[in-house]
Amino acid sequence: MKHRSHISSCLKCKSLEGMYEGTTRRIQSVVDGRFCTLNEKLRELRKWQELRDEALDALYAHKEVHSREEAFREDKLRAA
């Protein structure tokens, strides 16, 4: 349980989650929005989808760091 509270209080996690949530809001606004051409709308949609995917990749990579840290702590406790 300690591990989860450490992750939930991690400022980098919160920042990356905020970036992800911001991109999903932008995607929704593009979907709901009006554009002069369909190509313009699709170009904007793809841009925000790529940014969302990058934010999600960064979040998963960062959370993997927490998993490795926890595994290292558990190994140290077992060795002691």
Image: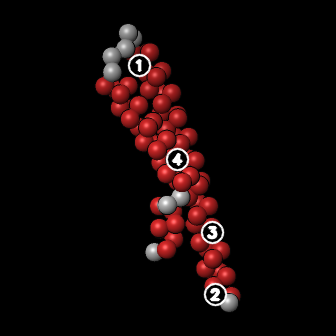
Count of residue discs: 4
Quadrant, the C terminus = bottom right
Q: Considering the numbered disc 4 on the image, is that residue within a helix, a strand or a loop?
A: helix
Q: Position of residue 5 (x, y in %)?
A: 47, 67
Q: CA distance from mark 1 to mark 4?
A: 26 Å
Instruction: Name the residue beneath numbered marker 3.
Output: 69
Which numbered disc, 2 or 4, marks the residue closer to the eye?
Answer: 4
Which numbered disc, 1 or 4, marks the residue closer to the eye?
Answer: 4
Q: Earlier in the sequence, mark 2 or mark 4?
A: 4
Asked if the residue under mark 2 is in contact with the one under mark 1, i.e. CB atoms within 8 Å, the reply is: no
Q: Position of residue 26 (x, y in %)?
A: 41, 31
Instruction: Name the residue beneath numbered marker 2.
Output: 78
Asked whether 76 or 9 is in front, the reply is 9
Asked if the residue under mark 3 is in contact with the one under mark 1, i.e. CB atoms within 8 Å, the reply is: no
Instruction: Name the residue beneath numbered marker 1.
Output: 41
- Indicate the amino acid at tag 1: Lys
- In the visual, does 70 lie left or right of 2? right
Note whether 63 is above or below 70 in the view shown.
above
- Indicate the amino acid at tag 4: Leu
Q: Earlier in the sequence, mark 2 or mark 3?
A: 3
- Indicate the amino acid at tag 3: Glu
**Residue 60 in view:** no
Note whether 76 is above or below 12 in the view shown.
below
In the drawing, what numbered circle is on residue 16? 4
Q: Tell me what residue is drawn at x 31 percent, y 25 percent.
A: 32
Asked if the residue under mark 4 is in contact with the one under mark 1, i.e. CB atoms within 8 Å, the reply is: no
Q: Considering the numbered disc 1 on the image, is that residue within a helix, a strand or a loop?
A: helix
Which numbered disc, 1 or 3, marks the residue closer to the eye?
Answer: 3
Asked whether 34 or 14 is in front, the reply is 14
Name, please, the residue furthest toward the bottom: 80
